[in-house]
Amino acid sequence: MDAVSIKVSGLSKFYHLYNSPGDRLKEALNPFKKNYHHDFFALKEVDFEVKRGEVIGIVGNNGAGKSTLLKILTGVLTPSQGEVKVEGKIASLLELGAGFNPEYTGIENIYFQGTLMGYTNAQMREKIDEIIAFADIGEFIDQPVHMYSSGMFARLAFAVATSVKPDILIIDEALSVGDGAFAHKSFNRIMQLKDEGTTVVFCSHTLYQVEMICSKVLWLHEGSLHGWGKASDIVKAYDQFLYKSNN
């Protein structure tokens, strides 16, 4: 359990911003390599590591860099600077319905998601009953997913992602969609995965969920690491920060 599952060192992600489309062309054609842009840092020199089986939370205001960090961890984005080491197979819930084909039924999307995660249809067939039971969306499992509510999306996506027993599970606000019974069932599933050695990264604005689920919390502010430590301590400090910011 002391093995490092995620190690982030000096991680930065920046974008070149231009005042106008013409400035981009000027920069590309300028013979003296003159810059017409300024850099915007979505993340700036972030360092942390997560051990195997830990459940960590990520908090911060909108625009703090949380989604950028999650996308880098899953390989959707590449760092501008620094290094990210991730050990094991990742399952992620970053955007509601991401990776689902809206014209496919729920059943068809289960197999489709399995293929994207590197599993054969035969392997997914062994898990299909468990996934359907956990999602608990009734006859809608045989309907095209474009008919689904946000809660149905969340149920099915969570059921698929957690059924494959990933080494690392990355969740972005999935538990904020749906009813209390679903949130409770999802919490139990996360704790089960933790006990089986899965590392969980959980990003949410719902602080009581973060404190309840996570052992440690990472607080991002304007792209920088503002706090990293025991969940109850960081959540309390962040909650006080929010109170002062809004008063």
Image (tube, rainbow, N blue to C red):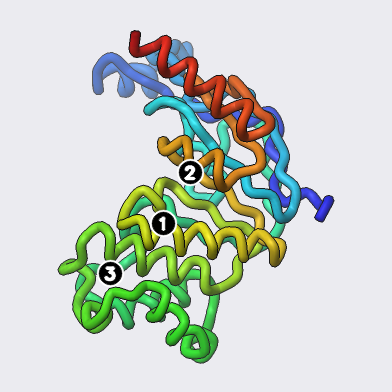
Q: Mark 2 near mark 1, Cβ–Cβ under 8 Å?
A: yes
Q: How many marks?
A: 3
Residue 101: give its label: 3
Q: Residue type at mark 2: give it.
A: Gln
Residue 95 visible in the current orientation? yes
Q: Residue type at mark 3: give it.
A: Asn
- In the picture of the structure, the residue carrying the numbered disc 2 is 209
Residue 77 in the image: x percent, y percent?
Answer: 49, 44
Q: Residue at x 28, y 14 (%)?
A: 19
Closer to viewer: mark 3 or mark 2? 2
- In the picture of the structure, the residue carrying the numbered disc 1 is 183
Q: Residue type at mark 1: give it.
A: Ala
Closer to viewer: mark 1 or mark 3? 1
Q: Is residue 233 left or right of residue 156?
A: right
CA gap, disc 3 and disc 2: 30 Å
Residue 47 in the image: x percent, y percent?
Answer: 69, 30
Residue 125: give its label: none
Question: Does dot 1 land on a helix, a strand or a loop?
Answer: helix
Disc 2 residue crowd, few under 14, some 14–19, many 20+, Cα 10 Å: some
Quarter of the image with the C terminus in it: top left
Question: Does dot 3 land on a helix, a strand or a loop?
Answer: loop
In the displayed structure, 67 sits above or below 222; it is below
Depth order, front residue of 74/199 = 199
Q: Is residue 202 left or right of residue 143?
A: right
